[in-house]
Amino acid sequence: MAIQHAVSGEPVNVLPPTNAPGDRQTVALFKTSGLEVMRVVLPKGKSMPSHKVAGDITVQCLEGSIRFNSDGKDQVLAVGEMLYLDGGVTHSLTGLEDACALVHIVLRK
């Protein structure tokens, strides 16, 4: 089933469903001309390989814990912690335990 994208002015649940393992996947919650918001799901040991995006990003850990690597430096994000990263910086994420993060990407024109 396709995810319902957020509509301006309406609430959206950013956490993945807890009772449907197949629905626990990374999805774009919405995308506009200037901003993309994603729910990133990282099962324990799964990685999002090194990559970079043009715009600034934030990564907020919603559940579990995540190893975040940027510029060769590892940091651990725990529930409730958020990290800001300048655009163009190479980074990767790994689930240290089953994890979920809310990611905001500023889209550069």
Image (tube, rainbow, N blue to C red):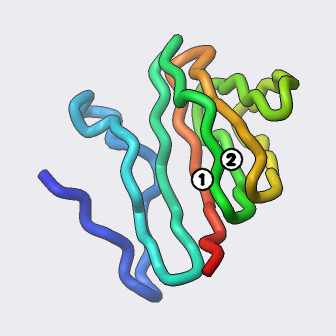
Residue type at mark 2 is Gln
Q: Is residue 28 left or right of residue 85?
A: left
Q: Secondary structure at mark 2?
A: strand
Residue drawn 58% across and 50% down? Answer: 102
In this rendered view, identify the residue nearer to me: 62 or 74: 74
Residue drawn 71% across and 23% down? Answer: 67
Relative image position of residue 69 (x, y in whole percent): 76, 28
Height in image: 98 above or below 91? above
Dot 1: few (<14), some (14–19), or many (≥20) neighbours within 10 Å?
many
Q: Nearer the N terminus, badge 1 or badge 2?
A: 2
Say which of marks 1 and 2 sits in front: 1
Height in image: 93 above or below 17? above
Q: What number is the disc on residue 42?
A: none
Residue drawn 17% across and 56% down? Answer: 2
Examine the image and state in which quarter residue 50 appears. Answer: top right
Relative image position of residue 88 (x, y in whole percent): 74, 54
- The residue that label 1 is drawn on is 103
Q: Secondary structure at mark 1?
A: strand
Relative image position of residue 20 (x, y in whole percent): 23, 33
Height in image: 89 above or below 92? below
Relative image position of residue 109 (x, y in whole percent): 61, 81
Residue type at mark 1 is Val
Residue drawn 87% across and 25% down? Answer: 73
- The residue that label 2 is drawn on is 60
Q: Circles 1 and 2: CB distance less than 8 Å?
A: yes
